[in-house]
Image (cartoon, rainbow, N blue to C red):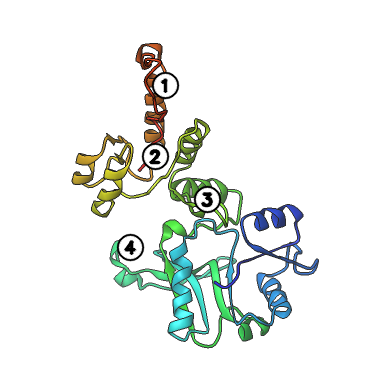
Amino acid sequence: FDSVWVSTDHDEIARISQEWGAQVFRRSAQTAADKSPSIDAVKEFATHHPEVDYIAQVQCTSPCLHPFHVAGPCRMMREEGFDSVFAVTRRHGFRWQEVHGGGKTAPLNLDPKNRPRRQDWDGELIENGSFYFATRELILDGLFQGGKIGYFEMQAEYSVDIDTDIDWPIAEQRVLKFGYFGKTRPQGEEFRSFNYSDTIGIKQLQARGVEVKVIAGNDLPDMGCIKLAGIGAAPGDAHHDIRTIANFVCRQPGGRGAVREFCDHVLLVMEKANLPSNRQKKQPANREVKKTSQFAPKCI
């Protein structure tokens, strides 16, 4: 993307968006109304930014989007000549015609005489509303889909749409599972987390002055990093060779709090090192002592 924008009429949302490196487009009262369709807001943006050729509308009600979900449609638009690409997910539901007043219903997507097992059926592709990519011309015509139309299939576990109150707890659990992919700040270091409790453990280490460099990995390509670490650790489901060379093997698998478990271990080691019985004896006055920190590890 050449630029990332947040379209809003809310001051607090605008402030936070700018803190995290996004530009802000101030929506008009007409396009910010509760019943205003999304296409109107995107069309308004396109009208004010004639320099933009392609627009990707990412819905804020789809919090489980990952970078690869938007990278795929970008390639389809740039390299395969699609004019519009939208997100779909696969559903395995048998649909029937709606009737009123005691009318007779009819199947819409199956033959009752040859009813398949759901697990043997490919299912149907359903638009999930996570994102819409389109050319500038289509947007100005009021369309998200047109020209050469393509779709990008998302797995069901990522296709979470916050539409009603019951969707909130589902979305929260998915976000806690998948975590955040990106950078702490536009100028900051790379940071990835797959479990919210992991971030708490990392913050506790940072509060104790520990230099924290977390590298997510549990397979053979990560072996060199673990060997270089002050204390190398591996999640419980890591490759056998990785678990063999690690100083600490977590009980938890990756993405289920392994980083938090390792952080707690490092904090415990630091506490034990500060006990009176474990402190180093006073060095002779005439001996030069270089002050080092034994417990400032790189955490893998």
- Give the secondary structure at mark 1: helix
**Earlier-in-chain disc, 2 versus 3:** 3
Please say if 244 is above or below 267: below
Mark toward the viewer: 2 or 3? 2
Residue 280 drawn at (x, y percent): 36, 17
Determine whether label 1 and label 4 are within 8 Å by CB.
no
Q: Position of residue 236 (x, y in %)?
A: 28, 40
Which mark is on residue 102? none
Splitting the image into 4 quarters, where does residue 11 fall? bottom right
The residue nearer to you, when weighing 75 against 112, is 75
Callout 2 touching callout 3 (CB < 8 Å): no
For label 3, the SS is helix
Q: Which mark is residue 271?
A: 1
Q: Which residue is mark 3?
A: 171
- Residue farthest to the front, as pictured: 286
Q: Disc 2 marks which residue? A: 259
> How far apart are the two marked residues, 4 and 2, measured between alpha carbons?
38 Å
- Which residue, given by chain and number where applicable, does mark 4 sit on? 118
The 10 Å Cα crowd at callout 4, few under 14, some 14 to 19, many 20 or more, is few
Three-letter amino acid code of the residue under disc 1: Glu
